[in-house]
Amino acid sequence: MSTNRVAVVEQNLDDYLQQARPAARLLAPDEPLRAGSRLTARKARELFEDMYLSRALDVAARELKRTNEGFYTISSAGHEHNALVAAQLRTTDPCFLHYRSGAFMNARVRMLDGATPTFDTLLSFTASADDPVSRGRHKVWGSREAWVPPQTSTIASHLPKAVGAAFSLSRARRLGVESPLPEDAIVLCSFGDASANHATALAGVNAARYAWRRMNPTPVLFLCEDNHIGISVETPSRWVRDTFGRLEHLRYFEAKGELDEVWDGIALAIEACRTNRQPTFLRLRCHRLWGHAGTDVEAAYLSRERIEEVESREPVLRAAMRLVETGAANPADLAALVRETRARVIAASREAVTRPKLTQVAEIIAPLAPEDTAAWRTAACAPIDPPQRRVIFGDKLPEAQTQPTRRTLGARINDALHDEMIRRREVLVFGEDVGRKGGVYGITQFLQARFGRARCFDTLLDETTILGVAQGAAQLGLLPIPEISYLAYLHNAIDQLRGEACSLQYFSAGQFQNPMVVRIAGLGYQKGFGGHFHNDNSIGALREIPGLMIAVPSRGDDAVRLLRACLAAASGSGRVVVFLEPIALYHERDLHTAGDGLWLSDYPVSDGTPESALMPGEVGVHHPEHDQVLIVSYANGLRLALRAAARLAAQGVRARVLDLRWLAPLPHAAVREHADQCGAVLVADECRATGAGIADALIARLAEEGYRKPLRSVRGVDTYIPLGAAAHVVMLSEDDIVNAAEELVR
Ligand SMILES: Cc1ncc(C[n+]2csc(CCOP(=O)(O)OP(=O)(O)O)c2C)c(N)n1
């Protein structure tokens, strides 16, 4: 068997077009291919152009790989019928795409003036900095003008955000948030048949059905491009239909057969989705040509007969046959089109390889973490409309002077959420139990009653969905504050932050954003729930995510000012921010002795002064007059460190305490400044020894910068947190801090 199946498939098309006889009568441009079909001859010829262009680009991709000038060979060959979907959507229907979407994109950008899909695609294959989507960072299918947020070749991870976008179409409108999309827009999300089994895909479909069941318009069209195989593993026959074809709250359609039949099948699905605003599933029969990617030798797991059978059914050849047989085109014209397309693609690929590549670190990472602290501060500190505050807070303004105002961390976060929802009408607060109950710890209390169910609502029990919905909502102009009720619950869903939310600006060169502030209740020491899962002192998985910002308040007044900065960074620069709340301090009132009330705080009003917010790098300093040892900490560790400092003072050791407040980016400059003013540095890192990297990072930085004074760290033990008293054996303690500080100064 010839190992070059690319050449075989190309030859099959050429052979057919050479020997085919024109139909007895050519169709007029507006005539349908078959009586009753909605596909006209003109449209069918356009589709063939888009489909064959995709094929020629796939051929070029393999040639570029062979000459080591191109870097991507996951092809669209055999999936070209997806062009028929694109051609029946509008460019104002957002699309989250499968990686085999070459023909889809050609048909979609055809609707835009001046689009250059051939060259754009070649620039992306060759990882050129001129690639208009990712600017050389990855091969992605995407387009700002055509509303296609880029996806890398991840599988299934885009379904939840597509559902979030569909859900948010009407939600944004209802809240008066300006929408660039028309009222009857729908959201398309495509994926493969093997990917349809992925937990994230099932989460997406489930979330869409659930949202619809709860009477939320959710016009998402799930397009399953079913080629019956995932890399080498065959999908059982009828699996997709068996799995998705009989679900309540999901309309199900199939499209297969000849070009015009596929067209008409797709039309029904799109129409149903657009008209009913209901989640809709469309199975599109596809055939995968040439293996999973250029590196995959299909012959290793598929028989020759099977490969040839697929080649005989492939959609470009079938489309050519259908066009010729129906008289929509004559074979000579199609042959000329094929020849001309091949020549054009080859010429463009020669040009593409000469285009610049990314070479500088600064250039590569520029869109990863855009920062504009001056603008963030202005936005974060601006006064909030007094009449609106009076409506929401009544006579109980959080800063009211007429009564004792000092309140706990939890209460202050709640106050700040109120203020931010007043300030920004696009803010949504959602998660498990945040609505009617007001959160497990009461942090979102009253928000639903005061701002309505459209702005503060309970979600289904799935963190992947929560973070997916946040992304979709954010892409449509809303500013989500999703809540993850416990830090340990994040881990089943962290790909939504790591692989998706934080990578969007990077892979779209800043053209798409999904700003959000994810509130996560976490860390150890809490008295209500013991044991692992509700106590989790490990944040390494967050700290390593490129571009993610992490703020960690420990006191109420700080929390208010940090939350403002987080929202301003999200809103102003599209940043994804985690606001990590130490559960054990939510309702803490005291610092040293019962009843001292030193962990309560007043409410810092947003009054236009720069102190109304705390930007990255702005640390908290306690006992600045002390200089014997600097104790650097955060969250629960701050409270332990302050208590330890008091004990140390009684023993004549003068400890200054620095609260990091931001764990990403870490405030290295501020730490260095105070370290220089003190005789030693002790990092009190409440996370387990390898679970945060805070102590590692700070000490390494000081050491590398030539800090010559004594350095030490104390940390939690590397273990899950056990139940009961055993927890205190493995978590960082006040004694650990006191002992280490004493040793340091001795
Ligand atoms: C989370 C994850 N697991 C596994 C993979 C590896 N992988 C990439 S594509 C693929 C097969 C997908 O098959 P299917 O969904 O049928 O799409 P097709 O490639 O056939 O179009 C696999 C297993 C991946 N990219 N991501």
Image (spheres, rainbow, N blue to C red):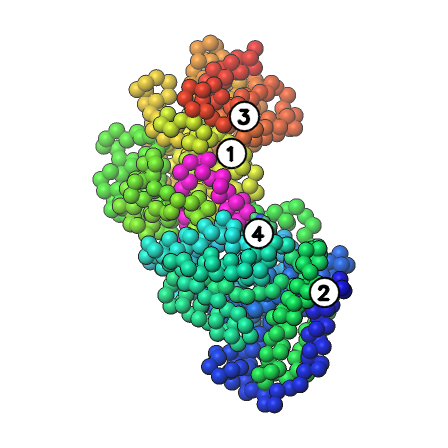
**Residue displayed at 56% across by 87% down:** 27
Mark 2 or 1: in front is 2
Which amino acid type is shown beneath numbered disc 1?
Ile
Q: Quadrant of residue 394?
A: top left
Q: What number is the disc on residue 5?
A: 2
Between the C-alphas of marks 4 and 3, the distance is: 32 Å
Between the C-alphas of marks 1 and 3, the distance is: 13 Å
Q: Is residue 272 visible?
A: yes
Give the mark count. 4
- Crowd around label 4: few <14 · some 14–19 · many ≥20 (10 Å): few
Between the C-alphas of marks 1 and 4, the distance is: 24 Å
Which amino acid type is shown beneath numbered disc 2?
Arg
Q: Earlier in the sequence, mark 1 or mark 3?
A: 1
Between the C-alphas of marks 4 and 2, the distance is: 26 Å
Between the C-alphas of marks 2 and 3, the distance is: 53 Å
Whether disc 4's CB lies below 8 Å from ligand 1 is answered: yes
In the structure shown, which secondary structural element does the residue marked by tag 4 occupy? loop
Q: Which residue is mark 3?
A: 718
Q: What number is the disc on residue 154?
A: 4
| Highlighted magenta segment, given as a residue range | 478-506
In the structure shown, which secondary structural element does the residue marked by tag 1 occupy? loop
Q: Earlier in the sequence, mark 4 or mark 2?
A: 2
**Residue displayed at 56% across by 69% down:** 81
